[in-house]
Image (spheres, rainbow, N blue to C red):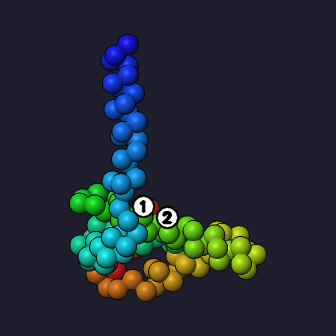
Amino acid sequence: MKLFSRFGALLLTLCLSLPVLAMSLDDAKRQLDTAKQQGLVGETPAGYLAVVKAEGNAREIVEAINQARRQEYGRIAEKHNIPVAEVEAVAGKKAVEKTPAGQFVRVGDRWVRK
């Protein structure tokens, strides 16, 4: 029985510490340009970032930025009474167009260096 108590306490501690391990949006924003320049993350036509190379903290950057984008797209869609998918498509098109040369964008099912 003691084993289950210790396991439960360990599991609870782990669950409570997970949000602390997540990257903050401010940290993700500060690291985004570097991650893009290094070819770790890229823009997609869907309006979100995706991991190009799973190195360093690319995944955490993508998750933090995409979470903020989802919230903003939802806010814009609600304000203008349009589907979120429309907002995502417009944002994705703009993001891909604005991506500087040398960085990655998703074209179809592959990554292309612009």
State which quarter of the image contains the N terminus: top left
Q: Position of residue 59 (x, y in %)?
A: 34, 59
Q: Position of residue 58 (x, y in %)?
A: 31, 62
Tally the numbered discs. 2
Residue 100 picture quarter: bottom left
Q: Residues within 10 Å of mark 1 (few under 14, many from 20)?
A: many
What residue do we see at 33% from left, 70% from top?
A: 27
State which quarter of the image contains the C terminus: bottom left
* Any part of residue 52 in sight: no
| Residues under numbered marks 2 and 1 in contact, where contact means CB atoms less than 8 Å apart | yes
Query: In what element is the residue under mark 1?
Result: helix
Residue 38 picture quarter: bottom left
* Labelled disc at residue 63: 1
Could you tell me how far apart the alpha carbons at marks 2 and 1 are, in whole angstroms?
A: 6 Å
Task: Say above or below: 6 vs 77.
Answer: above
Q: Position of residue 24 (x, y in %)?
A: 38, 65
**Amino acid type, callout 2:** Gln
Q: Position of residue 42 (x, y in %)?
A: 37, 71
* Any part of residue 102 in sight: yes
**Amino acid type, callout 1:** Glu
Q: Is residue 38 left or right of residue 24?
A: left
Q: Residues within 10 Å of mark 2 (few under 14, many from 20)?
A: few
Residue on which the image places disc 2: 67
**Foreground pick, 25 / 77:** 25
What residue do we see at 57% from left, 68% from top?
A: 71
Q: Is residue 8 left or right of residue 76?
A: left
Q: Is residue 98 left or right of residue 102?
A: right
Query: In what element is the residue under mark 2?
Result: helix
